[in-house]
Image: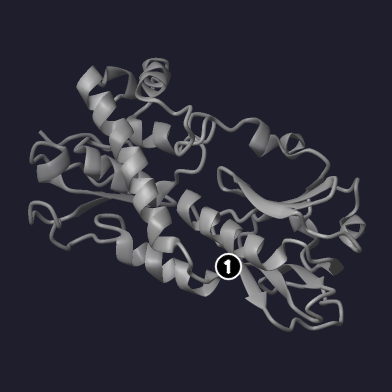
Amino acid sequence: MPELPEVEALGRFLDDHLAGRTVAAAHLASVHALKTYDPPLGALEGRAFDGVGRHGKFLDLRAGRLHLVVHLARAGWVRWSDRVPSAPPRPGKGPLALRVRLAEPAGAGFDVTEAGSQKHLAVYVVTDPREVPGIARLGPDPLSADFTPAAFAGVLKGERGQIKGVLRDQSVLAGIGNAYSDEILHRARLSPFRPASGLGEEEAARLHEAIGATLTDAVERCRGLAPGELKAAKRRGLRVHGRTGEPCPVCGDTIREVSFSDSALQYCPTCQTGGKVLADRRLSRLLK
């Protein structure tokens, strides 16, 4: 799933390639992807893009008073081409969800795609990004100046869930998903199942530092990369997520996994749980 660093990089790439350029055509290939109807998608045609921003995991492509907002969900992506087909795509079961063709340079543009059979990618055309329900519910951006240690400690005290779930809750923090929450907790030396409200002052400060450092490092690794290079760059930068059975790069212990019905987390017992191994089942608890 694209998370804050990858969406930030996609936004920068698109900003470089779209700013000042006019939309020649916008074609929907997946009817279910478009979540709004007024203004219509066709209202983008003839408008020039002003720039591209990010709200958590949402891309915000600005075109005058209109915003083309895209949430890539778990398997979505953006693919740039110097020449996209001029004919409207046929709606169907393929990966293509949206195609935008530019007037200049003639034929250039981008596709928004979604792999797999489960289609959760979402496209919105709005006059204010806050009209998108997911954006309206977002918590603070962890790379913003307002995300201070004191503010974060205050948020944690009101959360009753486990810290792994709290980090992934977009209403608490915007942009962190499964992979980077694993990386952050490893860097902070915290168990994914610690209650968020039970963290001490030093632990909360350590976690705040790990959030900023992990995401900043990932954004810097993505800087200047084309969309087709971002997924590989993300995988190379991960120290524990997706590396079950490999040695921890910090202590050398074996990285372990806890599997759920639709996802999995990875962690290092020595670095994060005092050497104890988490039971690999739903509602996992520390083995006694």
Instruction: Tell me the element at label 1.
Output: loop
Across and down, in percent, residue 150 comes to: 37, 19
Residue plotted at (79% across, 83% down): 85
State whether residue 202 is above or below residue 95: above
Q: Depth check: 248 or 106 in front?
A: 106
Q: Label 1: which residue?
A: 116
Q: Is 84 situated left or right of 254 in this image?
A: right
Depth check, front residue: 20 or 212: 20
Any part of residue 113 in sight: yes
* Residue 59 can be seen, yes or no: no
Q: Is residue 197 above or below residue 212?
A: above
Mark 1 Cα-neighbour bin, 10 Å: few <14, some 14–19, many ≥20: few
Residue at x-position 33% and y-position 47%: 214
* Residue for point 18% across, 55% down: 255
**Residue 91 falls in image quadrant:** bottom right
User: Taking 30 as reference, is 66 above or below it?
Assistant: above
